[in-house]
Image (cartoon, rainbow, N blue to C red):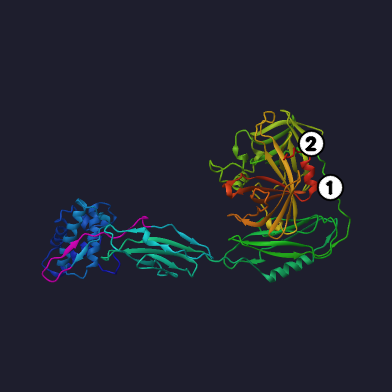
Amino acid sequence: LVTKDFELATTAGSTVINPMTNMVVEQLAGDETLTQEDAEAKVVTSVTDSGLEASKDLIFGDYITDSTEEAKALNAIGETLVDHSDLPVEKQLELTNAVADEAQTIIEDSPLEIDDFSPIVNIPTVGNPITVDPNSRPVDTENGVLENITLEPSDVWVELDASTYFQDAEDDALTFELKELANDLNGLTISSTDGTMTGDLTTAGTFNYQIFAKDEHGALSYPLNLKVIKLAENLAPEVVEEEQTRLQSIINGWQLQEGEIFNQTIDLSGLFNDTDGDIVKYRSGALTVDGLTITPTEDTSSIVTISGTPSKSYSAGQTFNVGGVDNDRAPTYVTFTLPEILEGTPVEPPQPELGFTQAHFDNQEWKMGSFADNDGEIGYASLAKDTHGLMFCWGSNSDERYSGNMSDALDQWGNSYAPFTKLAELDKHDDYMSHQDKDCMDVTINDGKIIDKEGSIYEMLYQHKPAEGEYQIILKVNQDELFWLDSTSSTFAQTSPASEKIISGFTDFDLTVEAGEEFDPELDGYPLTYAAGQFVYAENSYDYKSIKPTGFETPGNLSYVLDSFGREGIVLEETGSDSDYKTRYRYIQREFGDFYIGVKWSEEPQWNYVSAPEFGLYSYDQESMEKVIDKLPLIQD
């Protein structure tokens, strides 16, 4: 291995330059009577007298790119000549012959590898011949590359013993060197005696290190490469105060009145600045006025819309939040205050009819999901009608892209799931209404219930109408199957930040579903039973108690989690002595009137168990939840 600067020459017209061509040039320079052919012959003889079968073309060619043993021997000769380039050319020829002899011996019969041949050269006093002893350079065991090391901003360098990656055929004691391709070791050092890499990377960036081992004779290994990436500390977006003041002044001029339709937008594009990245998403939420909504919850668009009809008057000071999210998923939030909402005509919220009517069969696209134990069935649906009557459509007869199951595992052991990936795949196929092979079944309506031709009964347990012609329905099929139906434009994979809803002082009610252990032929499945409970959240904790049936309580720890795509969920870690010590994960998906729907699963680390993800139903008030569960079979203790 060559580690010092050197100069080589070649003859006129040659396209290759190497230590062999250099010896030809030096011979011609020292003896004007010598022809190029004679000089080349001397070099070839010095190589081949050993028995090394190397052609003239290979000797004076690019032997480095050749994989034959003869080429590898020439490479060893060339590196040795460069290391002793101060010798007269006659001595270089003698050295070539001696190295070639030893290389040929290794090729013919030696436990040493020609790839690692790095001879020990003895240059004697005047009059004595040059001698060469066999030796191998140290070699690494990792094919020249270690796995990349990435350090977070808060991480410290963990001591690395590089000596474990090298071995020497002669068992020589090794010393070690460390280099960085840009000559910036950035705080790392290596012990020359034991190969331990220590230190602390002081600067963020990518650093390409090369580790070398050297034996007792100075034979140097080829580099063992190691890429170390030190990540920079991300700075959350900053609020542009001048823009915040300007937007607040615009909001202060809004005219709001109880019972009057309101619609205004604000542009957040100038509100946030990110010094070490970009603002990639905007958020909105936590609007404290009944009857008004703020959209979108999260989007790449900077336009936020506040709309609706205030259902009562408010003094000035009601609020809403907006946020900017950078490309490292770090958010910054701003709270704006609303002006007074004047008294007007009180708005009586419409009470939707609890039952299916002809109006629901609108030939529009719906989304549908199952509240089942470890069975997150999901897909497109439609309530359709034509001249022949009413139809309920679900998925497709021939195309699996219009339905799926987010509870399906990615592996055969059921330890890996990707529910949002499956939901996002469904969102790509939003042309369901033009699909010509929907799986449709003729149905009729009887007393607000849908009945299909197989006798299954679809009973509406709850309905919310977000806008005219839009429906969100909780639906029971037969005795115990529970589904949600949504005709709004909400996507399958959408989520909203959990920390904007699940805050200290907040209370909600959940629905639990369990599948029985014995198959029921009448149900064509495993019977499902249900329970409901209450969560009361504090700053970093929660209390849970069952309400139907009663008798179970547990406290727990509350925290928030961001997945690799920036979706924010909550983590509920049971700590009560009567609990199973499960760690439950919940992501908030869609608002549903008096309810919201989430994606949830649990882990039991002590058993190395992860449950399949499923849809969860949550209510803002106990009465709404009890109206649903009263129609379902209860879990029996």
Relative to 305, 56 lies left or right: left
| Residue 336 location, quadrant | bottom right
> Tag 2's secondary structure?
helix
Rendered view: 536 above or below 527: below
Q: How many numbered tags mark residues here? A: 2
Task: Depth check: give the residue in front, 188 or 334.
Answer: 188
**Quadrant of residue 47 in the image?**
bottom left
- Contact between marks 2 and 1 (CB within 8 A): the answer is no
* Secondary structure under the numbered disc 1 in the rendered image: loop
Q: Which callout, 2 or 1, points at the residue further toward the start of the chain?
A: 1
How far apart, in angstroms, are the residues tagged by discs 2 and 1?
Answer: 19 Å
What residue sits right under mark 2 in the picture? 358
Residue corresponding to mark 1? 350
Q: Residue 254: which quarter of the image?
A: bottom right
Magenta stretch in the rendered image: 123-144
Q: Looking at the image, which residue sits at the far front?
A: 577
The magenta stretch spans residue 128: yes
Residue 348 percent across, percent down from the top left: 86, 51
Q: Amino acid at mark 2?
A: Gln
Which residue is painted at 22% across and 63% down in the image?
A: 120
Q: Position of residue 270 (x, y in %)?
A: 66, 66
* Three-letter amino acid code at the position of disc 1: Pro
Label 1 neighbourhood size at 10 Å, few (<14), some (14-19), many (20+)? Answer: few
